[in-house]
Image (cartoon, rainbow, N blue to C red):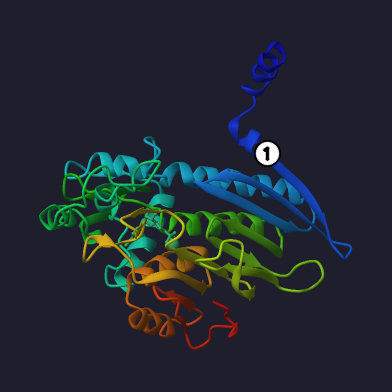
């Protein structure tokens, strides 16, 4: 016990960030002279892993993690001190000053909400709460919400009621955000992993690194190649067989994200209620098991995988086919496989 006390006394003076970095840190030797340096740590309610090939890899990874922490502290709606939490707290009351990063993330989120005609709506918070997804263990304490209740709460979900303003005062720029109705609530779960992974990759590239991979839960962003000169390759999880893969794809300077009904759900009377909610019906979506999107950036693949999960299969594939550099693999509720025109790997084993 005494030893544990001593260890605790030492550990509590180490900043949590550093502790996280110490959590897992290892080197993977590769066939070439170059090496992959890899570190992972818990963050964004998931595990984040960064792999870097090249000089000063440890230093670069640490900088990337620091940036991820910084951005997450601004965006995380479960952290009361974040800027997003402040916007939520003063919904219907007043505008809140926000940083350039939060403004940038929200402007991009609005773009994907527009693009998906509101299927992706980051003001989904009140409906997530209604269906029991805003607590640690998802689930309803009583019966399913009534249609009347759903309709009432749906009124609080509309990304167009987020007002963003950039004001110039001399050489000072003020950025502000406000949710127009009291009780509205932004939830960044569908795009923050992608956004934060992009920020990490930016730091890595700014350090002159050409070959790297950032993996944040269901989102991966990759650039360059592995030391053996092959592209980074990732497995796409089978939505119903844990530990099995549907397919593998090579990432050529791009990002891939998967949204799945197996990630966070509860079952009631043998029916699965998953964490992605259709803002139009106000109910958890049950038309897909998983949606994987390849796109140029993390926020794009992350936001679009959630958007397509909500949209019908036909509409989702049509949207992706209209976007250059974006592709999708959809497994519908019955296990049927759909691919966009240019989906790279045609062999999919369900
Ligand atoms: P992802 O795993 O990227 O598909 O994100 C799923 C998360 O996005 C959920 O856990 C919610 O936090 C949030 N979410 C659920 N439904 C929607 C929606 N229709 N639009 C935007 N975000 C959503
Ligand atoms: Mg997403």
At 65% from the left and 35% from the top, the residue drawn is 18
Point out residue 47 in the picture as x, y percentages from the top left corner. 58, 49
Point out residue 134 in the picture as x, y percentages from the top left corner. 33, 45
In this rendering, does residue 169 appear at all? no
**Where, quadrant-wise, is the C terminus in this rendering?**
bottom right
At 55% from the left and 65% from the top, the residue drawn is 241
**Residue 229 vs residue 157: left or right?**
right
**Residue 244 vs residue 139: left or right?**
right
Query: Label 1's element?
Result: helix
In this rendering, does residue 60 appear at all? yes
Mark 1 close to ligand 1, CB under 8 Å: no
Label 1 sits on residue = 23
How dense is the environment of label 1, judged by Cα within 10 Å: few (below 14), some, or many (20 and up)? few
- 334 in relation to 136, above or below: below
Residue furthest to the front in view is 269
At 76% from the left and 67% from the top, the residue drawn is 226
Q: Which quadrant of the view contains residue 190? A: bottom left
Q: Which quadrant of the view contains residue 235? A: bottom right
């Amino acid at each position: 016990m005494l030893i544990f006390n001593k260890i605790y006394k030492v550990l509590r003076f180490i900043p949590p960030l550093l502790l996280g970095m110490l959590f897992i840190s290892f080197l993977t030797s590769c066939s070439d002279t170059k090496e992959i340096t890899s570190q992972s740590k818990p963050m964004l309610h998931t595990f984040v892993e960064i792999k870097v090939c090249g000089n000063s890899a440890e230093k670069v990874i640490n900088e990337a993690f620091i940036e991820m922490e910084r951005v997450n502290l601004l965006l995380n709606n479960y952290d009361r001190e974040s800027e997003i939490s402040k916007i939520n707290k003063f919904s219907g009351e007043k505008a809140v000053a926000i940083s350039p990063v939060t403004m940038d993330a929200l402007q991009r989120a609005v773009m994907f909400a527009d693009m998906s005609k509101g299927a992706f709506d980051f003001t989904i918070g009140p409906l997530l709460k209604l269906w029991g997804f805003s607590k640690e263990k998802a689930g309803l304490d009583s019966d399913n919400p009534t249609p009347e209740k759903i309709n009432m709460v749906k009124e609080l979900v509309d990304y167009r009621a987020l007002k963003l303003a950039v004001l110039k005062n001399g050489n000072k720029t003020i950025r502000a955000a406000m949710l127009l109705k009291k009780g509205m609530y932004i939830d960044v779960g569908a795009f923050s992993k992608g956004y934060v992974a992009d920020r990490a990759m930016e730091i890595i590239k700014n350090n002159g690194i050409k070959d790297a991979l950032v993996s944040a839960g269901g989102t991966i962003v990759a650039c360059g190649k592995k030391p053996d000169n092959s592209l980074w390759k990732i497995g796409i999880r089978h939505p119903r067989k844990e530990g099995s893969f549907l397919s593998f794809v090579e990432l050529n300077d791009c990002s891939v994200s998967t949204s799945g009904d197996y990630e966070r759900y509860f079952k009631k009377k043998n029916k699965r209620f998953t964490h992605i909610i259709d803002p139009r019906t106000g109910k958890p979506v049950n038309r897909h098991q998983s949606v994987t999107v390849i796109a140029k950036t993390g926020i794009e693949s992350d936001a679009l995988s959630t958007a397509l999960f909500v949209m019908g299969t036909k509409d989702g594939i049509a949207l992706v086919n209209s976007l250059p550099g974006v592709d999708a693999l959809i497994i519908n509720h019955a296990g049927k496989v759909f691919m966009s025109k240019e989906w790279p790997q045609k062999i999919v084993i369900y």
